[in-house]
Image: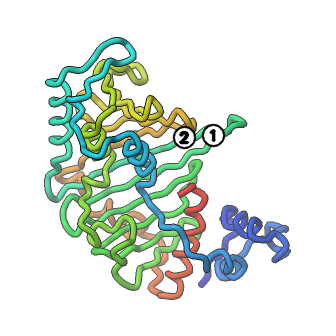
Amino acid sequence: MNTRLDTDPELLDLVRRADPMRDPRVQANAGLDTESALRLLAPELDRPAPRRAPRRRRTAVRTAVLAVAVAAAVLVVANVASTGNGSAVSPAQARMILRHVRDALAWPPHAIYEEDYVTTNTERDGATHTVEYHEWLSTSPPYNNRLIVIVNGKVLWEQAFINGRRDLYDPTTNTIYLAPGVASKDTVGCQRCSSDTPQSNSALSEVRYLLNQPNVTINPNAVLNGKPAIELTFDRGRFSYWISPSTYQPLQVEDRFFPGIGRFPIARVLTGSAASPNLLSLQAQHPHARVDHSRTDYKAANRVVDMRGALTGR
């Protein structure tokens, strides 16, 4: 496998963390090919890897909500609360917001839902760290989808589920690795392998979830970046979710305990000619990439993706 890693400092950093004295080439920054790097990292790679979850950002949100939710779900209309500016939503307003959110989740068939989610976390020393998940999801079976993972402005990898097969793209080698078979049922992101629909993997589904929970404060007159917004606050003020009052799509989510802001530059449903199948295809997006059919190479590439996933904090 001809995959030199001279332009992949993240993998070299992982080797250094494992044991910086294992190979002098690591210290000298001479670069390692994939096979050599994987041999150095073998003890770490052979450990059971945590399952990657492209939707990890919502896991924390839902956990926080469940922590304050009662056993039986109660519509927020029964929990009308005053907002910070003294205004309050009436039961009719709450029902209207929930109805609009449900309508926004009624996607047409043969469309593509596009969502770009960018998180910015601030460290104690003031340094910032950004992670971006840009994905496209088909609204019709078999629910093919494509995901790009970007950390601090650099693409770490891409993946696409086509008919249940998880293919990978490595930008450092400009290579597409074709999966040898259909992904297992527990593979995150494989809608064809589960009963999940694309709607259940969208950020808007979180908004609907919140609107069906108690102890959520709604401010229909909020302002975000100088524009009108609807703010949902929960977990005693730790989290806030802002949505558009016109499209009801998500705009921003904030965690005030661990300073971090997640923004949604894109959250839309593409229809007609805009919903091109090429958006879901690695080969269409990278027509000049080398296509690797080797089962062994795919396994190695998948391990590299696992290690790069550690860089996203996933």
The disc placed on residue 120 is 2
Q: Position of residue 268 (x, y in %)?
A: 28, 44
Number of numbered discs visible in the structure rendering:
2
The residue positioned 44% from the left and 60% from the top of the image is 53
The CA span between labels 2 and 1 is: 6 Å
Quadrant containing the N terminus in the rendered view: bottom right
The residue at which mark 1 appears reads as: 128
Q: Nearer the viewer, residue 91 or 303?
A: 91
| Relative to 133, residue 213 above or below | above
Q: Position of residue 307 (x, y in %)?
A: 60, 68
Q: Nearer the viewer, residue 262 or 154?
A: 262
Q: In terms of sequence position, does the residue under pointer 2 or pointer 1 come before the other?
A: 2
Tag 2 near tag 1, CB within 8 Å: yes
Tell me if mark 2 has few (under 14), some (14-19) or many (20+) residues whose alpha carbon lies within 10 angstroms of its own.
Answer: some
Q: Quadrant of residue 95?
A: top left
| Relative to 309, residue 257 above or below | above
Q: Tag 2: residue type?
A: Thr
> Can residue 180 be seen?
yes
The residue positioned 72% from the left and 79% from the top of the image is 40
In the rendered structure, the answer to whether residue 64 lies left or right of residue 76 reads: right
The residue positioned 45% from the left and 58% from the top of the image is 148
| Relative to 20, residue 314 above or below | above
Q: Secondary structure at mark 1?
A: strand
> Can residue 33 be seen?
no
Tell me if mark 1 has few (under 14), some (14-19) or many (20+) residues whose alpha carbon lies within 10 angstroms of its own.
Answer: few
Q: Tag 1: residue type?
A: Thr
Q: Secondary structure at mark 2?
A: strand
Q: Position of residue 160 (x, y in %)?
A: 38, 67
The residue positioned 25% from the left and 45% from the top of the image is 72
In the rendered structure, the answer to whether residue 263 lies left or right of residue 49 reads: left
